[in-house]
Image (spheres, rainbow, N blue to C red):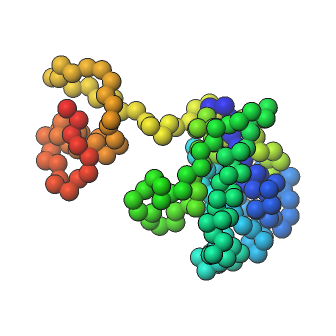
Amino acid sequence: MDGGICINEWLIKEGYLKLHESHKEVMPFSKAKIDWTKTIAWGEGGYYARLFMNVKGREPQGVIDPKDYERVREEIGAKLEAIPDENNRPLGTKVIKPEQLYRACRRIAPDLIIYFGDLFWRSVGSIGLNSIYTYENDIGPDDANHDYHGIFVLNDPQSRSRGRREGLQLMDVAPTVLEKFGVQVPQDMRGKIID
């Protein structure tokens, strides 16, 4: 991992997130005094960022008119993709709308999902860092991040098959494990048994 992008610091700098008072010490977003009447968006940290928009009728103090929702979402997404690294080189950030990834979005889905630098940079949600770049996460040094493709290793001593397999999906793991343990795979389970 190369570092972290402080999503809320960036939102403050760009005018999308307004505070009642600036913070000189690092604190979790949940402890910051947000001016919700002027806030357009806020983010959560993690291996990738989850950005939420303050939409009228959806959020208690929403400010974005629903008819402007898509325009504002596109605007923020384009600006996020354009964030350079600390040396002004392109990061290669990917901004994704949840409905592009998932067949159904349940509970409280973010409005945007952001992979900073193709996951070479993590998202930091804290406030008070006074920079959009950091080299530690919210709780200290961190030198690795998750990969959205993942890895799955299977060792079946009775199989002669060896090597790398392409075209597998996360949903293939559960039916494969059940089958290897001799448990009947439910008919409605998604995924296929890996040979």
* Quadrant for the C terminus in the image: top left
Image coords of residue 127 (percent x, y) = 76, 53
Q: Is residue 138 visible?
A: no
Image coords of residue 188 (percent x, y) = 20, 56
User: In the image shown, does 109 or 127 lie closer to the viewer?
Assistant: 109
Q: Residue at x 73, y 54 (%)?
A: 8
Q: Is residue 167 left or right of residue 136?
A: left
User: In the image shown, does 7 or 20 lie closer to the viewer?
Assistant: 7
Q: Is residue 97 left or right of residue 163?
A: right
Relative to 106, does residue 100 appear above or below in the rendering?
above
User: In the image shown, does 71 or 63 lie closer to the viewer?
Assistant: 71
Image coords of residue 175 (percent x, y) = 23, 44
Quarter of the image for residue 178 reads: top left
Q: Is residue 18 visible?
A: yes
Looking at the image, the residue that sits furthest to the bottom is 57
Q: Residue at x 21, y 26 (%)?
A: 156
Image coords of residue 51 (percent x, y) = 62, 58
Q: Is residue 161 left or right of residue 42?
A: left
* Quadrant for the N terminus in the image: top right
Q: Residue at x 68, y 37 (%)?
A: 91
| Number of dots carrying numbers | 0
Q: Residue at x 44, y 37 (%)?
A: 149
